[in-house]
Amino acid sequence: KKKLRIAVIPGDGIGQEVMPEGVACMKAACKRFNIDIEFDESFNDWATCDRYLKEGSMLPDNWKSVLSQYDAIYFGAVGDPEKVPDHISLWGSLIQFRREFDQYISLRPCRLLPGIECPLANKKIGDIDFWVVRENTEGEYSSVGGKMFPGTDREFVIQDTIMTRTGVDRVLKYAFELAQSRPKKHLTSATKSNGISISMPYWDERVKAMAEGYGDVKVDKFHIDILCAFFVLRPEMFDVVVGSNLFGDILSDLGPACTGSIGVAPSGNINPTGLFPSLFEPVHGSAPDIAGKGIANPIGMIWAGQMMLEHFGCKDAADKVMQAIEEALGKGGPEVITRDLGGKGDCKGLGKHILELIETL
Ligand code: NAD
Ligand code: IPM
Ligand code: MN
């Protein structure tokens, strides 16, 4: 088997703090299971706001050809809104990766893990266990539109939502197949066709058409407003939830919040064709409010690495990393667990604890 090459891009804020823990855990898992892999850590200033202030861009011009040579990108977080407006830093980095590398699936698990006090009452392990499948290249995140007559009374802005048949169908197909592979075979579609009267009825229409090919999958749909309410009121009902770019974004912070902290949530930005590298990152951002304090939870970053191992078919290593995360949370105690989860631990301490479990469990 050929050597896997990973481009490591920590980015801004706590991205720089959680990434070393993620890389160390990945190296430990790959060593233990004899996976031939190389982590290229020479991209430290890529996708940083400091680079933007120095060079005028988040990435060098040749970023696409450089990163195309890697099997995957392991990514931290971007954003330092005091220095650079968020839409500039994010559209100059992460959003470009997703669009240019056609990572049309954003795959985000939402699972109640041991040792975490669930903010929802009376939930036990297994009650919250579903995947959010988010469309990741089009929809509401479109570059079509603009500002007209700026600075005048006639000023207006337009940003068009784009839903292509190819774009909608391919994310639905992925979600249906994921649902089909799970015991409950249940797919929930996020819509808002009562209010958003062109794009969302189209989304519903494609869901209905796709469902015909998956007779064994039980399908339902909810408008995004009540769907958010049901995430909180009855999370047990979900198995796979599919949504447009914006709805999927919102649901994938709300879901993990219902399981205790967005600091644990991972995400895969996947190009299933393999024509371009996929990108694995935590769901959370650069957390300027805690950056530099060393208290960020590294689990979202480590779990994202676990998804990357799974993506490469390295099941033993992926399972071991997940087992180590669960063991650390379940038995680590308040000295190890980070503050977002009510403990007193720090980023390095929790990272090291998980690494040792990966080596020894
Ligand atoms: P955020 O996820 O950075 O932070 C939200 C809250 O959650 C903060 O209180 C933060 O301290 C806490 N938090 C987040 N991750 C944590 C962790 N690992 N451990 C402990 N606590 C954690 O979201 P935000 O405040 O909306 O955005 C901050 C910046 O990050 C902005 O510039 C935003 O654009 C950017 N952002 C980037 C990404 C990304 O790169 N994928 C994702 C979301 C936000
Ligand atoms: C995420 C983030 C990004 C998104 C931002 C930072 C552009 O919130 O990965 O969920 O909206 O996709
Ligand atoms: Mn988000």
Image: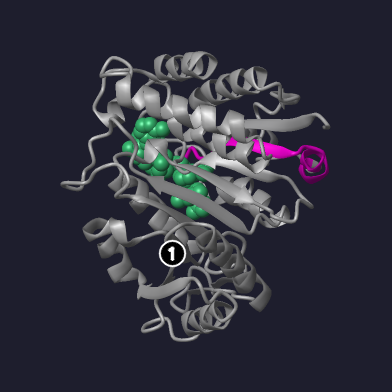
**For mark 1, what is the residue?**
247
For residue 212, above or below residue 292? below
Give the camera-side residue of 167 and 356: 356
Position in image of residue 18 (x %, y %): 49, 26
For residue 261, above or below residue 115? below
Q: Secondary structure at mark 1?
A: helix
Give the camera-side residue of 329 and 63: 329
117 sits left or right of 84 in the view: left
10 sits left or right of 242 in the view: right
* The quarter of the displayed image where residue 187 is located: bottom left
Does the magenta portion include 176?
no
Q: Which residues are magenta?
A: 63-81
Would residue 49 be visible to someone looking at this image? no
Residue at image location 54% in from the left, 15% down from the top: 359
Residue at image location 21% in from the left, 59% down from the top: 233
Q: Amino acid at mark 1?
A: Phe
341 sits left or right of 168 in the view: left
Position in image of residue 275 (x %, y %): 79, 52
165 sits left or right of 232 in the view: right
For residue 59, above or below residue 127? above
For residue 251, above or below residue 356? below
Does the magenta portion include 76?
yes
Ligand 1 shows up in which quadrant of the image? top left
Quadrant assignment for the N terminus: top right
Residue farthest left in this picture = 121
Give the camera-side residue of 312 and 171: 312
* The quarter of the displayed image where residue 335 is located: top left
Circle 1: is it few (<14), some (14-19), or many (20+) Cα within 10 Å?
Answer: many
* The quarter of the displayed image where residue 11 is located: top right
Give the camera-side residue of 212 and 94: 212
